[in-house]
Amino acid sequence: MNWVEQILKDENRALRQLYAENRSSCIQWLTTKGNVQLEDAKEIFQTAVIILYDNVKSGKLTELSSNIQTYIIGICKNKAFELYRKKKKTSLTDEFPTIAAYMDEEIEEKKELEAKVSQMNIAMQGLGDPCRSILQCFYYKKMTMDDITQLMGYKNVSTTKNLKYKCVKRLQSAVKQHKVVTK
Amino acid sequence: MKLNEHDMEIVDAYLLGELKGDALIDFEQRLKEDTAFAEDVEEMRVLMLAAKRSTLEEKMKFLQEEEIKFEDVVVDSKNPESKTIDTNSEQAKVKRLPWKKILSVAASVLVIGVLGVWWSGQNAEEVPTLVDTSNFPDAPVELFMSNEKTEYSPKMIKASNIYNLAIHEEDAKTQHEYFRKASVLFGEVWEEERDSVALGFFKLIDKTIK
């Protein structure tokens, strides 16, 4: 089974199958070898599948050198370690206060971007379809205007282009309105 | 935001890495000189990241709905006589249905747990008012959940499922086991999320079992 190809072809079907086939072994690995609680293990596994999906969609992963399970468990391992570190975080901060402060500075910068992305994400959810789908297809899935036209069943590419432009404008004005309200 | 349709096409091409050669050099020059334009480009970059996040959140929600199919309630592995709920049975489906609804209505902004570590900051801790469940011990947990709160953690959902199984269970021993399991989970939810509904049920079960 070429999973990369499957995800690109029919993503929900591929994800469903991938989830079912790898779920028990990955969760078992996490709870036994990874020393992770069951509920955390499920979330880590789900996150690992999402990361795999994102890597395929963003073009970072074009070919699997190992089998799919090895790949997913590899991500799970990293995530389990992150979780472990997060839980231990307080003691680290106490030990190296200067490093902690330095890292906070960096996080502060990211926080600003994070806030903007979060706000626009909320606005995007409120936008509804077809705008949300069009923007997701174009800006995340990197689909061409031709592909989107076909997918949405529009008359021609210029209809899609025009609609996409209007969607961006609508989204941006929704974000601005939200800002005014929260101020 | 003053980008016209033509400019937006160029910005899109830049952000998608499709701008090459002279066109790229010109674009970067314009970015340096025109701060208003640079701001517009930055806004489009944020939009691109938001498109990514909203897609991944939708996929995460999709997987969590898949997970419900697998969630077996195993009462006690050491006791072969105890019950295991087959998630494919009609009975199980009926009881699970409201949760599917809740999940799909819910959570346009579903940032939970590990995935949240990537993105979100911490929620400020709030002290909620305790929901009084004690007068209605037989009511399903859903009734006490807030309509305004649209996202529930997998653990809260599991605790509620098990509690709902318990109140319908006729066999006293199995029922006790369900209550005990639900109470542990509700206790954990209260500790982790400060959800007053969870605390209400934790206390209620505590009283019931005693």
Image (cartoon, rainbow, N blue to C red):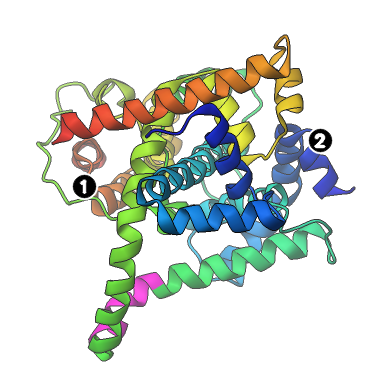
Judge whether A105 appears above or below B60 on screen: below
Q: Secondary structure at mark 1?
A: loop
Q: Which mark is residue B22?
A: none
Chain of the residue under the numbered disc 1 shown in the image: B
Judge whether A12 appears above or below B203 on screen: above
At label 1, the amino acid type is: Arg
Percent of width and height locating residue B128: 12, 40
Percent of width and height locating residue B166: 40, 31
Chain of the residue under the numbered disc 2 shown in the image: A
Judge whether B113 appears above or below A179 on screen: below
Give the main secondary structure, helix, strand or loop, of the magenta stretch. Answer: helix
Percent of width and height locating residue A77: 60, 69
The residue depicted at 72 percent of the width and 33 percent of the height is A144
| The image quarter in which residue B151 lies | top left
Q: Quadrant of the C terminus of chain A?
A: top left
Residue B176 visible, this angle: yes
The residue depicted at 30 percent of the width and 86 percent of the height is A99
Q: Is residue A43 magenta?
A: no
| The image quarter in which residue A17 lies | top right
Q: Which mark is residue A9?
A: 2
Q: CA distance from mark 1 to mark 2?
A: 42 Å
Q: Secondary structure at mark 2?
A: helix
Magenta residue span = A86-94
Q: Is residue A92 magenta?
A: yes
Q: Which residue is mark 1?
A: B194
Using a 10 Å C-alpha cutoff, classify the residue at mark 1 as few (fewer than 14 neighbours), some (14 to 19) or many (20 or more).
some
